[in-house]
Image: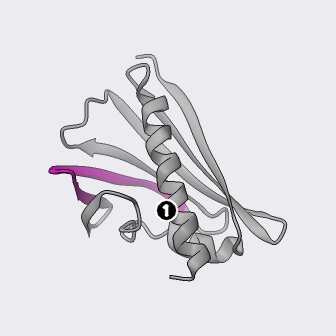
Amino acid sequence: MDTETEVAEIEIDAAADAVWAVAGDFGGIGWMPGIESVTVDGDIRNISMGGMDIAEKLVGRDDEKQQITYSIVGGPVPLDFHEATISVMAAGDGARVSWSVTAAPTGSAAFLAGIYGGALQALKAKVEAGD
């Protein structure tokens, strides 16, 4: 299976710890555009959005590195493989967030990185507003 990796990144005018408090919350992604509801059962996050139900599995979380990795494991998503990692890093007085995705088939990683780029804009607005 051929996979490809793409990355969306953003600078946020807030401390990395404040950004991680939001981005690192596996069940707290209601800030992402289009999400209608989120429930977590163990290491599975169920998301309802746009009339679809998508299941994502927590693959790993490292509070020290401020990094969380998950994989889409169910739903009407036409992917042969998916794994995404959100990383928060200090950048001067603020933070840099990267959302990398490795996916198959070809073209899906670029499509998803575009969606994640929009989600990072929403994360930036939420954190910088202090919500």
Name the kind of residue labelled 1 in the image. Ala
What is the span of residues highlighted in magenta in the rendered image?
45-61
Locate residue 2, reporting x and y percent.
Answer: 45, 17
Q: Is residue 121 above or below residue 17?
A: above
Give the quadrant of residue 18.
bottom right
Q: Is residue 39 above or below residue 84?
A: below
Question: Which residue is tagged 1?
Answer: 122
Q: SS of the residue at dot 1?
A: helix
- The residue lying furthest to the left in this view is 51
Q: Main secondary structure of the magenta part?
A: strand
Residue placed most toward the observer, 53 or 128: 128
Residue at 31%, 57% (x, y): give it. Answer: 34
Locate residue 113, reporting x and y percent.
Answer: 50, 39
Q: Residues within 10 Å of mark 1 (few under 14, many from 20)?
A: some
Q: Is residue 52 magenta?
A: yes
Q: Is residue 55 magenta?
A: yes
What quarter of the picture does the N terminus occupy?
Answer: top left
